[in-house]
Amino acid sequence: MPNKTNSLESFHRFHSYCARFPSELVETNITQYTKIGDSVFDPFCGSGTTLVACLAHKRKVIGADVDILAGMLSELKCFPLPAQRYVKWRAAFAKRLKKTIEEIKQTWIPNTRFQPGTTWTVNFGKLNIPAFPELNYWFPPQLTAALACISEGAHRCRLPHYERVALISLSASIISKWPNTLSYAKDIDHTRPHRAIQRFSLNRVLEVYLNRLDRTLKCLGKLHETYQNVGIINTVKDSARVIYPHDARQPLHLVEDESQALMMTSPPYFNAVDYPRAHRMSVCWMNGYAPAKLASRSNYIGLHCASTFDPEEWLKFRPEVRRLIPSKILDDSSLKKRLGAFFSDLEKVLGQAWRVLRPGGHAVFVIANNVVKNERLESHRVLLNLARTIGFEKKEVNNREIARLRRRFPTGQFGFDGPMTHEYVLVFRKRKGP
């Protein structure tokens, strides 16, 4: 069993999934509120931090997420292969990529320009060009050709696991920090990237991608070794489930009533991280995995527009929540509607937590406060009130400082009061008895 948090953190460094909480936070809570063999549920599993920590500590785990990239990442981390299997596959895959890149170099026509949503015919077949309207703004022609080549090579992998490894590494290459990113975008995971021109050659693109692929394979190989060392590698397929895409407001029928010892999660924050926008530049290359409405906010808590939601009707039966919302927000009908819908969504998530937790089980939520219209919105107090109304008992409320390197600046119309510096860790307990 791991005894150093850093050993778990290193497994997540092959892909910069935004707003991921640290492994230490998960380890602390699963150690305190569960025992070996218990099951833990994370309805916003993101890149799999909760899932990896639970498996490394011999807990069962179920993760779900509405985001397709999150689901793919979590799935890879739950079911890695031995390092030696990756070595053999990598050699053959890299050889094929080098061959196709060389063919593109030999036949490249200067001033080539690609039309989004079309196919590009080359000697060895056809390459799909993503239907991304801003393709030519963010990706120059030779970079587009190389990324299309890598994407096609990934889809030709015989085993789905290797295909996902190749595609996740492609995503990681595109969203890497400047200047190592394979795009013209800086700070792409902050959803409002800046454009900066740099030169891309076919050889350079392949080199950057293969380096990122090696990083992915190293992490997954080490993760497999960790699962093997704690004695779960032969049962991991029975110990972990990853369901995506799934809307956390809706029942997940694969999770039985009162079956979970702990729900450990961090829901999206109001108007903070625009996940569809942050992921669009990498997921557009992962043809066959992106849902038809990838950029739709209809199922993203904190982003979607609830056109039929009546905030007054909802707040009428929740006077304590109304008192916690500053008057400047209540006076803005549009903002009140969006914020009310956000808290209504969290109430539905709490309802699902109550359903799946066994009596005496715990729910741990990590959430930050906002500053909206220059007024501090204490989201953690609203969440605490909603949990009490459903029937949860408050166990702990802890103020957690965010490490300086992990702090995020506001990106939305309202955003946070400068960079996020603190979060709240709320611990609820489901009462035993009626």
Image: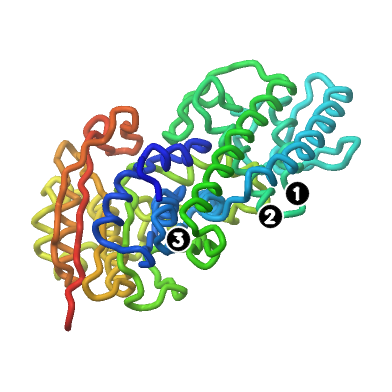
For the C terminus, give its image quadrant: bottom left
Q: How far is mark 3 from mark 1, CA to CA?
A: 26 Å
Mark 3 / mark 1, whichever is N-terminal: 3
Q: Which residue is mark 3?
A: 64
355 w.r.t. 155: above or below: below
Disc 1 element: loop
135 w.r.t. 23: above or below: above
> Which quarter of the figure has residue 93?
top right
Q: Residue at x 83, y 23 (%)?
A: 105
Q: Residue at x 31, y 68 (%)?
A: 261
Residue 352 in percent (x, y) is at 32, 70
- What is the number of the mark on residue 131? none
Q: Residue at x 24, y 64 (%)?
A: 362
Q: Amino acid at mark 2?
A: Pro
Q: Which residue is mark 1?
A: 157
For this orientation, the residue located farthest to the right is 123
